[in-house]
């Protein structure tokens, strides 16, 4: 998840770094530069990998666990994108390409539409293990890449890329972004053996993987497309509501339906705050709101 970082101690990457960081290539790709990672970089990866692997036992969904098990992703070093791409390409036709950080929306969508997953090549510093201004290699590779081994999610994320280009033309990108946010980044899935994480923003965060599943504070609501398109989200803290899909086939359906009539349906309707629970919601568990209440109180002068 993206967090506010201390600007004096953290270098910016990609789009956030301004023109200086803009690569020569129009698609913003760069070499991963695997040989250039230092022992300290690999050490940060190892710390994050081991902590997250421990936390995700019994919390990550089956597709995540399976994808992770079949990829050359381990504790000892930052994965090499070329090796990841080899395996992914055979399974679902996806590749991992390196980018310097955030890239412009249309560049991002164009990669996804062509089954290339843009991944930050840098890794966070040891003093910023728990917040991130921009997606780094741990968020992108540990959080997103295992699920690209799953054929349904592979199709869904490609469809998001195609849909993103279209949504931009229609001027409804905010609505599509919410769908991405509450599924690919912060989605939960109801498995037979319990609620599980599939969103990469949760799966790559130690604190949020516990909060999203175990804390009484957030709402957990059944996913509904129109409802989610109208729901604002938080980029600076844990989510106040998580949306739960019944199974992965719900994403498959989303990959195949035409969003245009849905955009029209929700156009001009009121938007919902991140903590709203509606009478029409199918509530999995209603949150106490205690966590964000305390944060708001603490922020008052
Ligand atoms: N760039 N590297 C990178 N990763 C993202 O997740 C990303 C991006 N650019 C734009 C973007 N996400 C989002 O704003 C879109 O999904 C709307
Ligand atoms: Fe992400």
Image (tube, rainbow, N blue to C red):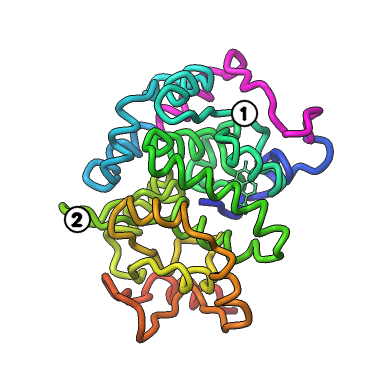
Give whichever of 44, 135 is nearer the camera: 135
Residue 146, x across and y down, in percent: 39, 34
Dot 1 crowding, Cα within 10 Å, few <14, some 14–19, many 20+: many
Q: Is 145 colored magenta in this rendering? A: no
| Left or right placement of residue 7 versus residue 215 in this view | right
Dot 2 crowding, Cα within 10 Å, few <14, some 14–19, many 20+: few
Furthest residue toward bottom: 279
Which element carries disc 2, helix, strand or loop?
strand
Marks 1 and 2, how far apart in space?
35 Å
Q: Is residue 160 above or below residue 33?
A: below
Q: Is residue 79 above or below residue 295?
A: above
Q: Earlier in the sequence, mark 1 or mark 2?
A: 1
Magenta-highlighted residues: 22-47
Give whichever of 209, 72 is nearer the camera: 72
- Residue at horizontal 34%, vertical 70%? 221
Rendered-image quadrant of the C terminus:
bottom right
- Residue at horizontal 51%, vertical 55%? 180
Which element carries disc 1, helix, strand or loop?
strand
Q: In this figure, which residue is indicated by the disc labeled 1?
A: 98
Q: Is residue 23 above or below residue 130?
A: above
Q: In this figure, which residue is indicated by the disc labeled 2?
A: 194
Give whichever of 158, 201 is nearer the camera: 158
Residue 35, x across and y down, in percent: 59, 13
- Residue at horizontal 58%, vertical 40%? 112
Q: Is 35 colored magenta in this rendering? A: yes
Furthest residue toward left: 193
């Amino acid at each position: 998840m993206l967090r506010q970082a201390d600007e004096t101690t953290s270098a910016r990457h990609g789009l956030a770094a301004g023109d200086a960081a803009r690569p020569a290539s129009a698609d913003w790709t760069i070499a991963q530069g695997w040989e250039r990672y230092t022992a300290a970089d690999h050490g940060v990866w190892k710390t994050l990998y081991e902590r997250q692997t421990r936390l995700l036992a019994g919390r990550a969904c089956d597709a995540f666990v399976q994808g992770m098990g079949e990829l050359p992703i381990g504790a000892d070093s930052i994965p090499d994108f070329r090796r990841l791409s080899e395996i992914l390409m055979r399974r679902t036709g996806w590749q991992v390409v390196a980018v310097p950080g955030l890239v412009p929306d249309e560049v991002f969508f164009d990669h996804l539409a062509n089954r290339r997953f843009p991944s930050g090549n840098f890794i966070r510093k040891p003093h910023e293990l728990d917040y991130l201004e921009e997606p780094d290699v741990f968020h992108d590779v540990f959080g997103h890449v295992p699920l690209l081994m799953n054929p349904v999610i592979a199709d869904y994320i490609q469809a998001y890329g195609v849909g993103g280009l279209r949504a931009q033309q229609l001027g409804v990108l905010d609505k599509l972004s919410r769908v991405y946010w509450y599924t690919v980044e912060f989605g939960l899935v109801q498995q037979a053996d319990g609620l599980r994480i599939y969103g990469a923003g949760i799966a790559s965060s130690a604190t949020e993987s516990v909060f999203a599943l175990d804390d009484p504070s957030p709402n957990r609501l059944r996913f509904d497309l129109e409802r989610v398109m109208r729901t604002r989200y938080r980029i600076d803290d844990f989510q106040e509501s998580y949306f739960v899909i019944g199974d992965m086939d719900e994403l498959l359906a989303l990959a195949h339906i035409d969003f245009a009539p849905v955009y029209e349906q929700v156009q001009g309707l009121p938007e919902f705050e991140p903590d709203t629970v509606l009478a029409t919601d199918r509530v999995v568990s209603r949150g106490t709101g205690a966590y964000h209440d305390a944060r708001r109180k603490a922020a008052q002068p």
